[in-house]
Amino acid sequence: MAYTICFLSAIAVLLLFLVYGLMHVSDTDSYFNCDRQLRWFEFGNSFAAASTSLATVLFFFVTLGLTNGLYILISPISFYIGTTLFNKLMLPRLKKQHYCVSKDNEKTIGVTLGEYIKVRYNSKLVKYVIMTITLLGIVAIMLIELFVGVTIFDIFLKPEYEEYALYFIAIVSFVYTGMGGLNAVVKTDKWQFWFMMVVALMLIVFMFFSYSNTVDSKQFFPTFLGDTGVLKQNWALYLNIITVNALLVPSLLRNWQLIAAAERDMDIKKGFINGVFMTALISLLFVIFGIQFFTVFSDAPLSMNGILSTMAESSSSFMSCLLFPLLFTACLMALLSTVDSSLLPVVQCIACDFFPNSKKGQEKKRYLFCMIITLIITLFLYKVVFKWLKFDIISWLFTIFGLVTISSPAILFACFGRDSVLRTRSMQISTIVCTILGLVVAMTISIIGNNSSGESNLSIIQLNTPIAISITSVLLGLVYFVIHFSVKKKSL
């Protein structure tokens, strides 16, 4: 009975989103920017839904809460700090530089990250390198989401039918995103986020009143320091989390798209504040639930499937026939929100940054063509990565965030650097070389970690982003200041 309810709920959600996309078709003027009428609450909901990933919040946080307790909240806290720094420091610079804003008859600096990079460095090659690496990271995120999403269907589908679930989920995501554009994504993000929030609260309340005597308060705050403490065991994890979250916001294409779609500065600032707060809140709720659940059901496999299967087989009809389908549906919504939030900026980047020229009136066809190509490439890479190469999900999770953030130093220099330095040939070449070098370093460390044996395996992989970002930032900083003093000396 529980599995039947769950399966029907999943089909109903997928059909609902499919129909929504077909009923709300955006024209070319509003496809990527909602006619620049995005309000702060829509901005916040969309930001939070995109950040509430199935692979991170409903997998990473729920399971790591057991071993790290509430200390794992260093992730949403550092994400909050990174978002606040972007809001307070970078956003005023972007507005002053006229990103997506035309004032006093001055031309806007662009409506995508790619256009912004091109103008700031005065180089198409710099743009292509940075956007290619960024796209690799975003596509990798979609791969992770599809993998985890397909995995949760294993609770009632045989392995041979797994790919059918993948294709159906992918097609639904691509159809409602492709037809409705950003308007459809923002509207569905609202449903997705608040549904997940309500489900998280229901789970915590149920676990508290049903199993309050089983959960010890010390499990929320395990030993942090000392030889057996959380910090000693997971120092590489925490270093990776802080580095990634501090630099993630500037490198996410979705954030640049939301900024360009908002009409007023207030909507952007309030949207970021509201969105990152809700992201931290829902992360907290699922960490608490994870600690509660795995403490009570200590024999359950440490995974989302372990939670779902345990709930489905529970003797409590309330848990099996209500909470289990609700949690599964929340997982499915988290999957869809992350896929559509990654997909649309990718299509915008390909259509506007790599192939900007098209006949007037043919833009929508070009967008849909890019959507189909992205779908084919994503499904092909899914087979390569998870079927043929058999990548480990956790190792891959830490590797892709290295890909996503590796361009952040170049983006930060574009924002805060001087035109006279950024547009020199030396700075352009250095930016390209250092960014590619950072990518090579991150991937090399990941490969070494995957080939190593013992407990240090994951720790090595988790160091890929901190080391790569440090090398890229230091080298770019040295080059920048050498060129800066050289230009200053010539001007005297």
Image (tube, rainbow, N blue to C red):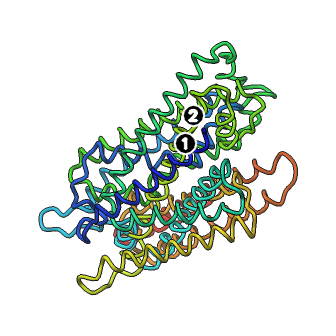
> Is label 2 in a helix, a strand or a loop?
helix
Q: Residue at x 24, y 47 (%)?
A: 39
Count of residue discs? 2
Image position, residue 237 (x, y; %): 68, 43
Extreme residue in the bottom direction: 359
Q: Residue at x 40, y 60 (%)?
A: 18
User: Which residue is tagged 2?
Assistant: 321
Indicate which disc residue 5 carries.
Answer: 1
Is residue 458 among the parts visible in the rendering?
yes
**On screen, residue 239 above or below 205:** below
The quarter in which the C terminus is drawn is: bottom left
Q: Residues within 10 Å of mark 2 (few under 14, many from 20)?
A: many
- Relative horizontal placement of residue 37, taking residue 212 as reference (left or right): left
- Looking at the image, is 209 positioned above or below residue 272? above
Residue sitting at x 53%, y 63%: 168
Return the x and y of residue 263 as percentages of the image width and height.
21, 54
- Residue 444 found in image quarter: bottom right
Mark 1 packing: few (<14 Cα in 10 Å), some, or many (20+)?
some
Outermost top residue: 213
| Camera-nearest residue between 309 and 255 | 309
Quadrant where the N terminus is found in the figure? top right
Q: Do the residues bearing badges 1 and 2 touch, measured as CB atoms within 8 Å?
A: yes
- Which residue type does callout 1 highlight? Ile
- Asked which quadrant contains residue 292, the reply is top right
Residue at the far front: name it: 1
Q: Nearer the viewer, residue 422 or 67?
A: 67
| Between 13 and 36, the one nearer to me in the picture | 13
Residue drawn at the location 74% of the way across and 56% of the way down? 392
